[in-house]
Every structure is written in structure tokens, then in C-alpha cells.
């Protein structure tokens, strides 16, 4: 399959939906909405929305289109992801001036503006997830999705991972602790994106479990490759300064295992992700290709 073409198609569908569902600039709040839109439309790869859509497609039973709720959920996931990057870049956290080759949100809108843009995106995501006009999924499934995503984004997921990441800067971190940080900071939202897709596509519990394993492995591979790119990538490729992890003495795979072992570990995680899809038919081809893409990505 042509994964590049698939990603491009899906990315433009997600962009179209984000344009449709994002708040229009309105009156006195125009400045706030503009700050949210600045980062939301700054060139993100849309990995989490695409994983959600691909997981739904992998389990969907009929030939009908995916429910509108799938695209709404994909947009909500991107809002949460974007908020996390805006806050991660703040002076109090990673203090970055560039992201995706553009000035970070606080460089353009000031610290208070960026904090509020992040807050706005995070809460708007849950507004989207609870959109009353959607016909499906059922109220039970919708609640289940909201619970999965809020746990993944919150204190025992991404926020907790970020706390541990910052707390451990400059310290020697054991492998177990590193794995815990990575799975919360990056893996949790990626896994939740796939689990939400499994529910939206009406997958069986067995498929949900298999996709959860796929999500954990792909999430791990994604973060490990990110660690590698931080060591090996160029500023042009990454759209931000390279080598920032080493400078901040972050707990990373290359710091613990060296570059070659780290690459090997990412490869194994991708292999295990694909193996988790053994019981799936051709509808899971995009998910298999996405796992490989995550390993070979350049940013
Ligand atoms: C501030 C609560 C809070 C959390 C921040 C996600 C995160 C936690 C920090 C970002 C640090 C980082 C670079 C993590 C590595 C994995 C990651 C999330 C990379 C960026 O995601 P991509 O590659 O970004 O999907 P794009 O630009 O494509 O949207």
C-alpha cells in the first residue's frame, strides 16, 4: 500500500474537519481563537487522528461510511495533542522558541495567551466529544470514549508523564522509570486514539484488546523514534532545535542504551505492534503500514 498517499488523504480529511469544527473567530474572543488556530493549523502530522480513523476502519463490519463521530473524535484528539505541545514549549517547561519550523505559541501570543490557548483547546476537545447532535455512538459508548481519552490525557496519563519527565531532568533514570514516563507522556494518548477508533468502528472486545496492544507498542515505538530523532535529526527536519534532550539531561532511550540499541528496540516494538494485528484481515493494512511509517519517519 502507498502509505504516503494514505497519510496525505487522511491528513487533508482531518484538516477539512478541523476547519469545520473549530470555533470561528468571533467578536471579542477573536484573539483567543486565533491563538488556538495558530498551533492547530501549524503543520502537524495528525498522527493520533489518523490512528483513530485507521483503527475504526480495521474493525468496521459493514461497507457504510464511518460515523461522523469518528471524525469529531479525531479532531478532539488533535486539539488535546496541540494543547500539550503549546504547554510543553512554555518557558516553565521545555522553553522552546520553535516548533514545526514556526515560532512557538508563546513567542507569538505571549505566555498568558499560550497558556489560555492550550486550556481552550483541551476543554474544547471535550465539548466536541460530547456533541449532542451526533447520532452515534450510543451514549454508553460515548461515555466510554470520553473516559478513555480523559484518563489518557490526565494525571495518570500524559499530564502525569510530563510531571515525571520534568521531575527527572538531570537525574539518572532506571529503565522501568523511563518506560513509565514514555508510556504516560506519549503512549497513553496514542493508545487511547486507537481504542476510541475500535469502539467507534463497533469492534468486538477481542479486537479492542488486540488494538490496545497494538497501540501500546506503536506508542512506545513513536516515542523511542522521537528520542532518536532528537539525537540524529537536523533542525530543518525537526522544525526545532535538535539535541535539546541531551542539553536538558532528559531521560531518553539513547541516553540509556546508545543509538544502535535504541534503534533495535524501536524495531522490536514495531514488530510486536504488527504481530498484535495477526487476527485482522486486509482492513488492517493501513495500521500495519502506519507502524512501519512511525519507525521510518523523519520528523
Ligand atoms: C504539557 C501536559 C503536557 C504534556 C506534554 C506530548 C508532551 C507532553 C510533550 C511533547 C514532548 C515530546 C516531543 C514528546 C515526544 C513525542 C511527541 C508527542 C512528539 C510530537 O508529536 P508529533 O510528532 O507532532 O505527532 P506533530 O508536530 O506532528 O503534531
Image (cartoon, helix red, strand yellow):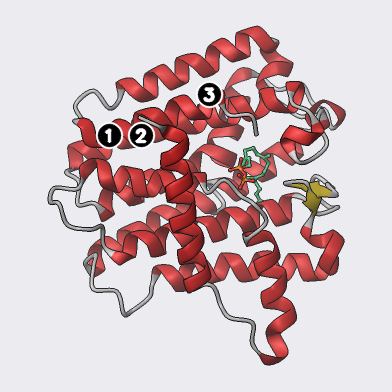
Residue at the spot 81% in from the left edge and 70% down from the top edge:
112
Task: From the viewer's side, name the closer residue of 47 and 170.
Answer: 47
Asked if marks 1 and 2 touch (Cβ < 8 Å), the reply is yes
Instruction: State the image coordinates of residue 12 (x, y, percent, origin top left).
Output: 48, 55
If the image is split into quadrants, where does the C terminus sit? top right
Q: Does residue 189 show up?
A: no
Q: CA distance from mark 3 to mark 1?
A: 18 Å
Identity of the residue furthest to the left in this view: 62
- Judge from the rendering whether residue 201 lies leftward or rightward of residue 242; answer left or right: left
Residue at the spot 34% in from the left edge and 35% down from the top edge:
286
Q: Secondary structure at mark 1?
A: helix
The residue where tag 2 is placed is 287
Figure quarter occupied by ligand 1: top right
Q: Secondary structure at mark 3?
A: helix
Task: From the viewer's side, name the closer residue of 205 and 96.
Answer: 96
Instruction: State the image coordinates of residue 206 (x, y, percent, origin top left).
Output: 19, 36
Badge 1: how crowded within 10 Å, few (<14), some, or many (20+)?
Answer: many
Instruction: State the image coordinates of residue 49 (x, y, percent, origin top left).
Output: 45, 51
- Judge from the rendering whether residue 208 lies leftward or rightward of residue 23; answer left or right: left
Q: Is residue 295 above or below residue 112?
A: above
The residue where tag 1 is placed is 284
- Which label sits on residue 295? 3
Q: Does residue 276 show up?
A: yes
Q: Answer with the quarter of the image where residue 291 lies.
A: top left
Sequence-wise, the earlier of marks 3 and 1 is 1
Amino acid at each position: 500500500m502507498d502509505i504516503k498517499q494514505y497519510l496525505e488523504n487522511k491528513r487533508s480529511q482531518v484538516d477539512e474537519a478541523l476547519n469545520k469544527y473549530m470555533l470561528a473567530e468571533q467578536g471579542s474572543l477573536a484573539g483567543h481563537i486565533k491563538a488556538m488556530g495558530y498551533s492547530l493549523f501549524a503543520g502537524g502530522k495528525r498522527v493520533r487522528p489518523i490512528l483513530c480513523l485507521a483503527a475504526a476502519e480495521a474493525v468496521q463490519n459493514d461497507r457504510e461510511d464511518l460515523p461522523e463521530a469518528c471524525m469529531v473524535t479525531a479532531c478532539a484528539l488533535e486539539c488535546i495533542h496541540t494543547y500539550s505541545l503549546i504547554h510543553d514549549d512554555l518557558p516553565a517547561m521545555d522553553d522552546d522558541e520553535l516548533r514545526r519550523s514556526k515560532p512557538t505559541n508563546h513567542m507569538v501570543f505571549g505566555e498568558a495567551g499560550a497558556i489560555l490557548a492550550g486550556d481552550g483547546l483541551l476543554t474544547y476537545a471535550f465539548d466536541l466529544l460530547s456533541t449532542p447532535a451526533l447520532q452515534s455512538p450510543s451514549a454508553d459508548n460515548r461515555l466510554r470514549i470520553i473516559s478513555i481519552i480523559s484518563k489518557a490525557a490526565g494525571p495518570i496519563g500524559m499530564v502525569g508523564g510530563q510531571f515525571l519527565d520534568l521531575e527527572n531532568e538531570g537525574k539518572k533514570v532506571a529503565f522501568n522509570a523511563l518506560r513509565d514516563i514514555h508510556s504516560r507522556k506519549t503512549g497513553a494518548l496514542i493508545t487511547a486514539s486507537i481504542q476510541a477508533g475500535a469502539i467507534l468502528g463497533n469492534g468486538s472486545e477481542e479486537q479492542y484488546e488486540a488494538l490496545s496492544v497494538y497501540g501500546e507498542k506503536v506508542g512506545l515505538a513513536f516515542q523511542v523514534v522521537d528520542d532518536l530523532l532528537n539525537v540524529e535529526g537536523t533542525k530543518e527536519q525537526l522544525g526545532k532545535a535538535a539535541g535539546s534532550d541531551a542539553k536538558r539531561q532528559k531521560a531518553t532511550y539513547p541516553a540509556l542504551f546508545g543509538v544502535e540499541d535504541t534503534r533495535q528496540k524501536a524495531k522490536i516494538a514495531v514488530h510486536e505492534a504488527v504481530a498484535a494485528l495477526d487476527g485482522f484481515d486486509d482492513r488492517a493494512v493501513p495500521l500495519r503500514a502506519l507502524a512501519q511509517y512511525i519507525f521510518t519517519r523523519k520528523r
